[in-house]
Image: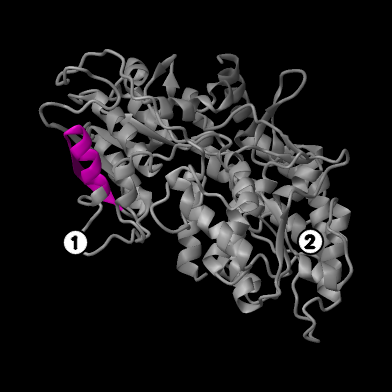
Amino acid sequence: MNRKKWLILLSMTALLGVSACSGGNNGPSPNTATEPDNSQPSAESSNASATDGPFAKYEDTVKITLGRQGVSGNNLPAGDTLEDNEYLRYVEERLNVDVQYEFSVEDLKAYNQKVTLAIASNNIPDVMIVDEQQFHQLAKANMLADLTDIYEDYASPLIKEYYNSYTGDRVLNTGKIDGKLYALPNTNIDGNFQLLWIRKDWLDKLQLQLPKTVDDVKGIVKAFVEQDPDGNGAKDTTGLLGDPTIVGDGGFFTFDPIFNAYHSYPKSWFKDEEGNIFYGSTTPETKQALGVLRDMYANGLIDKEFLTRKWEDNAGLVSSGRAGILFAPWFAGWAMSDAVKANANADWVPLAVPLDDVGQRNIVPSVPSGSFLVVNKNAKNPEAVLKVLNVEYEGIRLIDPATQELYKGQGVGWLNYPLNLQLDFQDSLARDIPIYDKVLQDKDKTDLPARILPRVESLLKNHDNPKQDMAAYADSLAFYTAAAVTGAKELKRIDPVFYGNTETMLKRGANLDKLENETFLKIITGSAPLDEFDKFVSTWKSIGGDQVAKEIGEIVKQK
């Protein structure tokens, strides 16, 4: 997989919590969405048909204006654009809604600048997707429509099922202020934590067992570095790959699992038994984990060049067969296929390890949401936005048979629908595994949902002829093999008490993060002693960390 495809994959999964690399017009992620109940509650609208509701078509054309981030590499055929394509026309024709793009900017930074200018001029379109800071800025300026009743009356059963699948309304609540719903948040599915990906063919060659603990991982890395697992007679295999970001939800090559094995959870906020708020990066357990990583680096078990390697450099080590062990999420299965292209004997397997001292793989769930659909309080038909979202998801999930023919086989991504808001079930990865198991056992595709058929075909193709079709192999490795591991019985969720930003975070967060990252990297690479951690904690607290903890404490009390 070349750099461009890797980056598209990463951007899709980072933003949407899912991979969109499979072919066809599959939606944001796998799921077993049931077909919505089209029964329609009564509601009033300024331009409603005789029976109004989630899917009711307007008698007279309704116009809504839209501002959104554009799409990179959208694969649209000649003549079609983001502002005029089959997906958009499908939504418009079903509802008699005219979606007019007020602006679309592909670059994220430029898009955020456009949104900031729109807010400053008090001239926003009817609907936008914004980040958390922009959402609260809009709400504070009294520019947003109250969607509380509109959501209840117009959101389709499927949309409500997505939000209800997240325990305790933890996602939908992020769009509420003082109990009222002012935004529809996106949903980040479970499972984006790092797995240990390892070359099992190298393990077999060196007669090693699959690892369970950090010590097991250390022993395997040492063997991979010293015992010529690729059999080329040269000492050219690297240790555990790394990334200078150190930790990060959904990150590739980061060290999150090492920290988690020692009950350390950097960059997350928690509450102790006495009710005190604390930051996971400042705990004694984090110091212990840093000490382990420091020793691994000193002993050549972590790639000595990880500080200076670019992301694509690490990808190159994987594809060239020089790296045989790394941490990455389930969707890294697509990346591993590059190594198999070069060497058909390469056998990458994902594992939910390393385990802690009681045999658990601790994980911190993804932030519930990071982007928000907001509606201008002056929009003439705010309910039209909900209707567009309803119809759009009937298309994305291929529930409406007519949508199965849109761009069939052309690989046009779902982001070309008008509202780029990713929604899915919390357990969407796990939901499809029993379906795949049954299909592979029975070879029967009867009555399967249309949206899952392309992936089922990939799984069957790879099952019958392993590694002969790289796209099918990659699909199978990511969406079946690795996705199944995200539901391993050893997993234990460690839920933070707070997600988001506080006032001090927005003002001083960059400096706090810089101090943390620089200190951790110096400790790991040996340019600073381990006890530098204690100085970091003291400084971090004094330059804003304690104030952030106080602000979070006040927020948590109000919940």
On whether residue 98 falls in the magenta region, the answer is yes
State the colouring used for the structure image: one colour
> Which of the 4 quarters of the picture holds residue 397?
top left
Q: Residues within 10 Å of mark 2 (few under 14, many from 20)?
A: some
Q: Which is more toward the observer, 68 or 434?
A: 434
The magenta-colored residue range is: 87-105
Between discs 2 and 1, the one toward the N terminus: 1
Badge nearest the viewer, 2 or 1 = 1
Mark 1 surroundings within 10 Å by alpha-carbon count, few (fewer than 14), some (14 through 19), many (20 or more): few
The answer to whether any part of residue 198 appears in the image is yes
Magenta highlight on residue 70: no
As displayed, is residue 407 above or below residue 36?
below
What's under tag 1, amino acid-wise?
A: Gly
Determine whether the residue tagged by mark 1 lies in a helix, strand or loop. Answer: loop
Apparent side of residue 350 relative to residue 458 in the rendered image (left or right): right
Q: Could you say where residue 531 lies in the image, as x and y percent from the top left? A: 82, 48
Disc number for residue 526: 2
Name the residue at the left extreme.
60
Q: Residue at x 22, y 36 (%)?
A: 94
The answer to whether mark 2 and mark 1 are in CB contact below 8 A is no
Rendered position, 243 above or below 549: below
